[in-house]
Image (spheres, grey):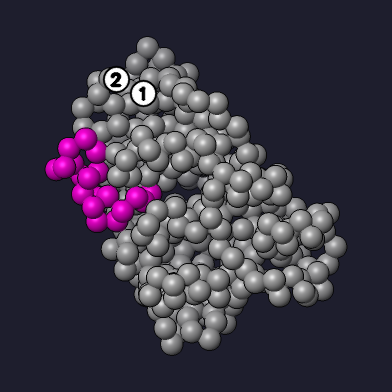
Amino acid sequence: MTDFLPLNGTDYIELYVGNAKQSALFYQHVMGFELVAYAGPETGIRDRASYVLQQHKIRIVLTTALNTDSPIAQHVAKHGDGVKVLALWVDDARKSFLETTSRGAAPAIEPQTLKDEHGEVVVASIKTYGETIHTFVERKNYNGAFLPGYQPRKSAAPVTPIGLKHIDHCVGNVELGKMNTWVEFYEKVMGFKLLVTFDDNDISTEYSALMSKVVSNGNGYIKFPINEPAAGKKKSQIEEYLDFYKGPGVQHIAIATDDILHTVAELRKRGMEFLYVPENYYEDVMDRVGSINENLAELRRLNILIDRDEEGYLLQIFTKPIQDRPTVFFEIIERNGAKSFGKGNFKALFESIEREQELRGNL
């Protein structure tokens, strides 16, 4: 079968935030992203300011409203800082829009051509869970810094990259009973395939649980796990997210690195906070995962988790939420052959998240 929606990868992820100027400093000096482009009043954009940050293949766009009646301001007032756009790089944005809307996607932005002296970009958007949208970006006839309307901009102070390479996957949280609805959306509307399923036997503790299914496009460049809460004695992390985000949305962004020891050491040195997994996790982890290339003492010192599947092993760690609402966070992941998502670490991670929930009074 031919892929009716060929995707080249993630083009960018746009977050609506309360203060993009200050947020951009966090991404530059904590996470090692370079400022590469800007749009705002100085570039002829009157209602918003947007900062484009890049590290290797990853582009993060931070956008803030300049007027209180802006939809951007309303989004931030409702959700806090959160992901608005998961943009997908395509060769034909109009065809991508037509193929998906003809299969049932609700249109968000009709196809349009954006032009400036550097060429043209075709964009079009469809709606997905909550207020999140997918924007198809066709940029084969463009050589500017980012998109028309943006001007090149450089970081004001030196920025040191930390080895972040590309987006590995993006996880969405949806309401109870809606996981299968959105899995079917990705299968029917976007031609994705179900990659793996986790139920409450896989992801649970004494107190809480969740269900998760992972969908992936044909070439595997785009992977979207979709979570929903499962019944438990206390409130799950998914319910806490939904309460504070005021609905479905992107829970976390997983970013790949080739050297997680270096990346996490740098992040810790620069002030990034991570979930804590107790020391006893490491007592029998090697019995479970077998031989690895890294030094266990170093992984233990940095509190990095290890898991193995039939293809190889992976190393991963999760930040605490990157704003005061307990919503969006990051995962740092290094894959050494493994194609899975760290199933063997789920219980330890869930317990560490529950400890944070309990401190916040939300368990």
Up the image or down, 310 lies above or below 209; here it is above
Residue 70 included in the magenta stretch of the image? yes
* Mark 1 or mark 2, earlier in chain: 2
In this orientation, which residue lies closer to the viewer: 191 or 68? Answer: 68
User: Amino acid type of disc 2?
Assistant: Thr
Residue 244 x, y percent position in the rendering? 32, 64
Up the image or down, 228 lies above or below 80; here it is below
> Which residue is label 2 attached to?
43
Residue 19 x, y percent position in the rendering? 32, 40
Counting the numbered discs, the total is 2
Q: Is residue 1 visible?
A: no
In this orientation, which residue lies closer to the viewer: 325 or 336? Answer: 325
Task: Identify the secondary structure beneath mark 2.
Answer: helix
- Magenta region, residue range: 65-83
295 left or right of 44? right
In this orientation, which residue lies closer to the viewer: 308 or 120? Answer: 308
304 left or right of 138? right
145 left or right of 16? right
Which quarter of the rendering shows the C terminus?
bottom left
Q: Are marks 1 and 2 in contact (CB under 8 Å)?
A: yes
Name the residue located 47 percent from the left edge and 28 percent from the top edge. Answer: 35
Name the residue located 40 percent from the left edge and 60 percent from the top edge. Answer: 327
User: Amino acid type of disc 1?
Assistant: Tyr
- Which mark, by number, is residue 150? 1
In this orientation, which residue lies closer to the viewer: 296 or 191? Answer: 296
Residue 267 x, y percent position in the rendering? 59, 46
Name the residue located 40 percent from the left edge and 53 percent from the top edge. Answer: 323
Q: Marks 1 and 2, Cα distance to the nearest angstrom? A: 7 Å
